[in-house]
């Protein structure tokens, strides 16, 4: 069920002309940004790291807007009632949606790397070439689960879109997708440590530049597991509330 | 816990609260359904008729677990819609009219595959079931096309296939025939009749009286959130027994003339339906008084089309019932 659901939602998403346009343009911009930001540094492996970081930013944006908007989108399409009426736990219905947004986001990661290679000749040599795909996959799943938590809380809030905008940049920064965590003020530390994105980003960086990948992967999975549990509980509450307030359909 | 009844509703109520006004928000409450009681036997085809805003869709959504009632209880096959939601959902299908509710950028086949998975159709049966249903709704051969390229009627048929995937015991059809051409509508009626004949319980809402008359075993007429009449089509039709109908096609009838018609001796009910420039006046009277002459006298000087005097139909009975509420 999760597989088929994810596949179908990814298919549906990837056919949206808006998404296609975004995912063609954004990675190029990101690759360019990454390269110019770090050109001063000059070192090749820093460039690769920057490209990976930029790609991850794309994944995060996709999950943030995708998951945040996931439920709203289904409502607009009139499919929310149909999927929530299925004899399933709400989490099983919604998780494929948010993982699908993680997948379309991963495309952005890969595309950024490819553009980096094509435009600037960044050498794609990873410290742990085998750990990298694993870390990337874990990242997607983690983002999907984190997205689930976002999705369930976003439906409760009326200004979900505004919140999504506000959250985009801080999470990039705080989870060290672009700049190393060490340059950030210390108060951001605990916040960063609680976000699965931090650990996902770290795992990817380590896979790129060397370092202990697996502990970060484990942390990332553990935290996103927690997100999943919280998100599932929140969704159950949200579903019932929506049936009381009649918000499953477009009112 | 199995029950003799497929659907049982007791004192079902639903109110909507909504915020109106932007600067000074006010909470308003709309009482959409105000105490509805009825039961539907297994395998019965039950119709729910009523004017726009009567509370039909609201009633259906309480029965199919999409809305939690604000009062009363309902059971589907003996399971409570509020407390045993999962059990209820396993047994019901829901099809609504209109062209939303499908994944437009996926093919019909992908839509059906996704919903089959979601509604728990076993993997080994899916292929066969989907092929059967595509055949049934005559979309076989076009299942690989994206839904966004489908016509309204094709989408509607796909909706129906989707609703039937898990072979539900109880099927809710909310205006399934809007936007469907006459030939397809006839096929749709055939399909619904077949489903009921093979044991599926169907709850149908429609604005087409002929459709309800032809299909339904029993009909409830609902207006203002309450059931105004309930019975077989023949029973409802007999509400208009002893009446006679005069139907007049006219152009530009002033309100004063309408009021005058209503006040004619023997007249029980009047209704106007506008079709473009044309107005169709329906005047119900006691059968023993011939009012045709009086009606035409009142309409003197107005351009008229066909004038007809006939026996009442289900539609006339419906107008009587709704008019009295
Ligand atoms: N989500 C909602 N929020 C607020 N009011 C609503 C909502 N849905 C329906 N209503 C109100 O409840 C009443 C009953 O609506 P309902 O949709 O049940 O009517 P209906 O009988 O299905 O009408 P129609 O024939 O037009 O489909 C109407 O007054 C409508 O305005
Ligand atoms: Mg309705």
Image (cartoon, coloured by chain):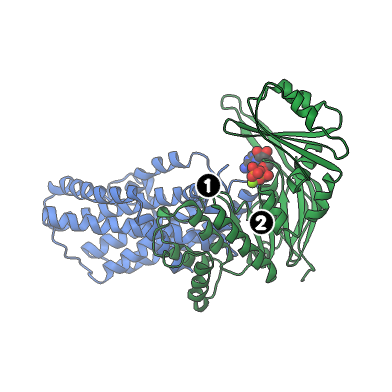
Mark 2 belongs to which subunit? B
The answer to whether residue B253 is above or below residue B271 is above
Tint of chain A: blue
Residue carrying label 1: A155
The answer to whether residue A233 is above or below residue B221 is below
Viewer-nearest residue: A18 or B320: B320
For the C terminus of chain A, give its image quadrant: top right
The numbered mark at residue A58 is none
Residue B242 at x, y = what percent?
A: 87, 44
Q: Secondary structure at mark 2?
A: loop
Residue at 49% from the left image edge and 72% from the top image edge: B131
Residue B283 at x, y = what percent?
A: 76, 35
Residue at 60% from the left image edge and 58% from the top image edge: B186
Q: Is residue B71 visible?
A: no
Q: Is residue B11 left or right of residue B113?
A: right
Residue carrying label 2: B65
Dividing the picture into quarters, in which one does residue B87 lie? bottom right
**Category of crowding for the residue at label 2, using alpha-carbon neighbours closer than 10 angstroms: few (below 14), some (14–19), many (at least 20):** many
Residue A34 at x, y = what percent?
A: 20, 49
- Chain that the image shows in green: B
Q: Secondary structure at mark 1?
A: loop
Q: Is residue B69 visible?
A: yes
């Amino acid at each position: 069920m999760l597989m088929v659901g994810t596949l179908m939602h990814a298919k549906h998403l990837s056919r949206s002309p808006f998404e296609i346009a975004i995912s063609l343009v954004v990675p190029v911009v990101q690759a360019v940004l990454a390269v110019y930001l770090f050109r001063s540094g000059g070192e090749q492996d820093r460039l690769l790291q920057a490209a990976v970081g930029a790609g991850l930013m794309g994944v995060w944006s996709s999950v943030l807007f995708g998951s945040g908007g996931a439920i709203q989108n289904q409502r607009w399409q009139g499919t929310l009632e149909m999927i929530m009426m299925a004899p399933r736990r709400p989490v099983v219905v919604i998780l494929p949606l948010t993982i699908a947004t993680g997948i379309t986001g991963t495309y952005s990661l890969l595309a950024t790397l490819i553009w980096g290679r094509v435009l600037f000749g960044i050498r794609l040599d990873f410290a742990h070439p085998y750990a990298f795909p694993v870390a990337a996959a874990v990242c997607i799943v983690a983002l999907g689960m984190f997205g689930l938590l976002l999705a369930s809380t976003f439906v409760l809030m009326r200004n979900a879109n505004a919140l999504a905008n506000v959250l985009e940049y801080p999470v990039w920064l705080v989870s060290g997708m672009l700049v190393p965590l060490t340059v950030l003020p210390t108060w951001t530390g605990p916040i960063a440590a609680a976000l699965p994105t931090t650990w996902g980003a770290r795992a990817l960086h380590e896979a790129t530049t060397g370092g202990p990948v697996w502990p970060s992967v484990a942390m990332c999975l553990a935290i996103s597991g927690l997100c999943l549990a919280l998100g599932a509980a929140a969704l159950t509450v949200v579903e019932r509330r929506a049936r009381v307030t009649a918000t499953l359909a477009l009112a | 816990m199995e029950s003799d009844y497929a659907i049982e509703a007791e004192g079902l109520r639903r109110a909507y609260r909504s915020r109106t006004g932007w600067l000074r928000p006010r909470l308003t409450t709309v009482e959409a359904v105000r105490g509805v009681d009825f039961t539907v036997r297994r395998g019965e085809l039950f119709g729910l008729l009523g004017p726009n805003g009567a509370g039909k869709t609201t009633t259906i959504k309480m029965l199919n677990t999409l809305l939690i009632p604000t009062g009363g209880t309902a059971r589907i096959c003996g399971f409570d819609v509020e407390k045993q939601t999962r059990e209820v959902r396993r047994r019901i299908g829901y099809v609504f009219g209109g062209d939303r509710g499908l994944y437009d950028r996926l093919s019909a086949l992908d839509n059906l595959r996704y919903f089959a998975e979601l509604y728990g159709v076993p993997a080994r049966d899916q292929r066969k079931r989907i092929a059967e249903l595509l055949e049934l709704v005559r979309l076989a051969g076009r299942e690989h096309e994206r839904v966004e390229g489908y016509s309204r009627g094709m989408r509607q048929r796909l909706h129906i296939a989707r609703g039937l995937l898990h072979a539900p015991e109880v099927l809710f059809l909310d205006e399934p025939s809007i936007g469907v051409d006459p030939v397809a509508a006839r096929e749709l009626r055939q399909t619904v009749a077949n489903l009921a004949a093979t044991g599926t319980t169907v709850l149908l809402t429609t604005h087409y009286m002929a459709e309800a008359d032809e299909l339904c075993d029993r009909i409830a007429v609902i207006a203002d959130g309450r059931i105004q009449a309930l019975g077989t089509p023949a029973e409802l039709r007999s509400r208009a027994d002893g009446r006679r109908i005069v139907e007049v096609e006219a152009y530009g009838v002033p309100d004063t003339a309408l009021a005058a018609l209503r006040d004619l001796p023997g007249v029980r009910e009047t209704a106007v339906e506008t079709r473009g420039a044309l107005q169709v006046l329906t005047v119900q009277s006691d059968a023993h008084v011939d009012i045709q002459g009086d009606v035409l006298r009142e309409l003197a000087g107005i351009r008229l089309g066909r004038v007809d005097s006939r026996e009442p139909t289900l539609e006339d009975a419906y107008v009587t019932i709704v008019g009295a509420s």
